[in-house]
Amino acid sequence: MNSHFASPFVDQDGNWLDLANRKNISADIAPTGGQMPRALGLAFASKLFRHVDALKSFKDLSTQGNEVCFCTIGDASTSEGHFWETINAAGVLQVPLAVFVWDDGYGISVPKKFQTTKASISEALKGMQKKEGTNGIDIYRVKAWDYAGMCEIFEAGIQKIRDTHTPALFHVEEVTQPQGHSTSGSHERYKSPDRLAWEREWDCIRKMREWIIDNALAADEELSDIEELAKQKVRDKRISAWQVFLEPIRQQVNRAAELIDKLLQQGANDHGQLQKLKSDLVSNREPLRRDVMKVLHQALLLVEHLPQAGELKYFYQELQRQNKEFFNSHLYNEGAKSALKVIGTKVEYAAGSPTVNAFEVLNKYFDALFSTNKKVVAFGEDLGHIGDVNQGFAGLQAKHGNLRIFDTGIREISIMGQGIGLAMRGLRPIAEIQYADYLLYGLEPLSDDAATLHYRTKGQQSCPLIVRTRGHRLEGIWHSGSPMGMLLHSLRGVFICVPRNMTQAVGMYNTLLQGNDPALMIECLNGYRLKEKLPSNLLEFRVPLGIPEIIKEGEDITIVSYGSTLRIIEEAAATLERQGISCEIIDVQTLLPFDQPQTILHSLQKTNRIIFIDEDVPGGAAAYMFNKVMEEQAGYRWLDVAPRTLTGKDHRPSYGSDGDYFSKPNTESIIDEIREMMKE
């Protein structure tokens, strides 16, 4: 399932290719229905390119929005929520999306009567059929074995999609299945003899052959010759491709054998074990890279004490470097489009710069951003007309247009899909999820698709999506969450930014927009009404990723945190200072990436005490930070007392101000924990 074909969308420097003048295949994912959300975004991009004047100059990305997104799905997978949410959104948005449902009557072994209402996806969707004066989708039904009939329907249907941007579903019924769902099973196990007999008679390949002969396009003998030539060509190409794959590995095998032979000639033969390792490796007709590494490692264990083992050790280390590149590179952009290479620029304030509500800093910034960057679009629940629930986009839809800043339905999965598809088409989407808790709804496309795209294509496709949300301290179970551990462990491949205020958020937005990687921006929910000075360099100010900031210097203890919790920590530190305890407070700023210059370690070397404070559950983000500093940075070497984590409780925060107080770290609990550390 990891070999879905894809075509490059970007060059080696991360620049978008001429997508408008080629056929493009987005890198697919294996989770059933997972292709649907992305398809919505790929199609929606054509609508923007057709109707947004600011985008019409990007002729290498679109030809007046004439592109159609083809999306195929098996009938059983239409039971997934991804399918229904995407089809509904496509019908609302009116985008050029062509969905082909391949229906063989089963979902693996389960008949469709147990999966789909009325045992027919086209029947179940009839209420969405577009009619005069309404939105909706067009629905077509065709037979898989009827080649001429499919051509007639497809040609007219696709042309209508291209011309009118009306999405369509093509229900392809009576698909025959010459093999089982996978190599693990056979369809003979669950299909009746009558069904199997029907499939043999109405086999799509057989019916295609009959159609060719009936229309005098070729004779039976000619088709037999073509079939045999095709089979031989495939066999030859398979053998050739496998040999090309094996050749560099065989070179590694030969080199490993040479080096082991050299050691044997120098008398290093521990009771014949080296000779056996070499013989086993050389006799392996189809070795893998891991086979070479295993033999080299075992050989080094036998001879590492010998001075002549250096050449073997060097070869092993060189292969380690190569294999890291083959299998563990390109999680993020590594070239010119890496946001990690963006140099920080300090925030500036003009003389007499006003102090405003923090949301106004964002509002002024987004206004300037949309005025200067034509590719930026923003969307989400309540984002357009009312300017988001916290007013970051207030008044901006009227100024910049309802196709650049717009509302969506309550449908987090397809909001993420819209963003992924738009980003893959070369735009710069900001997709909003109102609260961090609700990222759970959109987590699958973010984790399986956005976070893995650059890695699984080795940099040939990129997804510069920014997901904007908010979280941290507020009152209530479902609007105040900090599910950071969940996000950290499911979104490797996505930058996770946790700014402590809106000015820092602006600097991070600017940095992210210079790169090509997806990112999650978690703004402080209880920070929008706090006061901040309005910067004078809103578009130029950049916060570098992975660089913590020491927001208060101290001598006795290092306190590590982020986001809204820092304000609680600052209150506690002020009390502790009056008691003679000097606290150094570090804002990590981004969790992915984390503290690349090892700022926290340098602080620990000074204070010899450290505590990680976080609102997440025990074992969440605080444990992640603890691991990074204690293990990766070897911070344990500088400890005078046991390090601590202070987190939220195991449950969601309780209701009300008291619920917030007793469910998360508070000023008093921080003071008490640090006082105990100072006594130790």
Image (tube, grey):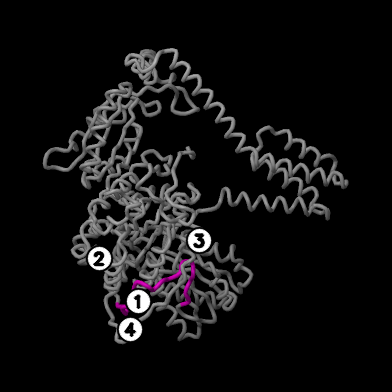
Give percent across and percent down for residue 187: 43, 22
Residue positioned 39% across, 50% down in the render = 18
> How many numbered discs sit on the rendered protein?
4
> Looking at the picture, which amino acid does disc 2 mark?
Phe
What crowding class fits label 3: few (fewer than 14 Cα within 10 Å), some (14-19), or many (20 or more)? some
Secondary structure of the residue carrying tag 1 is loop
Q: Earlier in the sequence, mark 4 or mark 1?
A: 4
According to the image, label 2 marks what residue?
Answer: 393
Q: Main secondary structure of the magenta part?
A: loop
Start-end of magenta stretch: 531-550
**Amino acid type, mark 1:** Asn
Type of amino acid at the residue the image marks with label 4: Ala
Numbered tag placed on residue 537 in the rendering:
1
Question: For the residues marked 4 and 1, what is the alpha-carbon distance in whole angstroms?
Answer: 9 Å
Q: SS at mark 3?
A: helix
Q: CA distance from mark 1 to mark 3?
A: 34 Å
Q: Name the residue at 32% across, 57% down.
A: 431
The amino acid pointed to by label 3 is Tyr
* In the foreground, 70 or 476: 70
Residue 229, image x, y percentages? 50, 21
The disc at residue 350 is 4
Q: Nearer the viewer, residue 264 or 163?
A: 163
Earlier residue among tags 3 and 2: 2
Q: Earlier in the sequence, mark 2 or mark 4?
A: 4
Q: Is residue 279 above or below residue 366?
A: above
Query: Tags 1 and 3 in contact by the CB under 8 Å rule?
Result: no
Q: Which residue is mark 3?
A: 624
Q: Secondary structure at mark 4?
A: loop
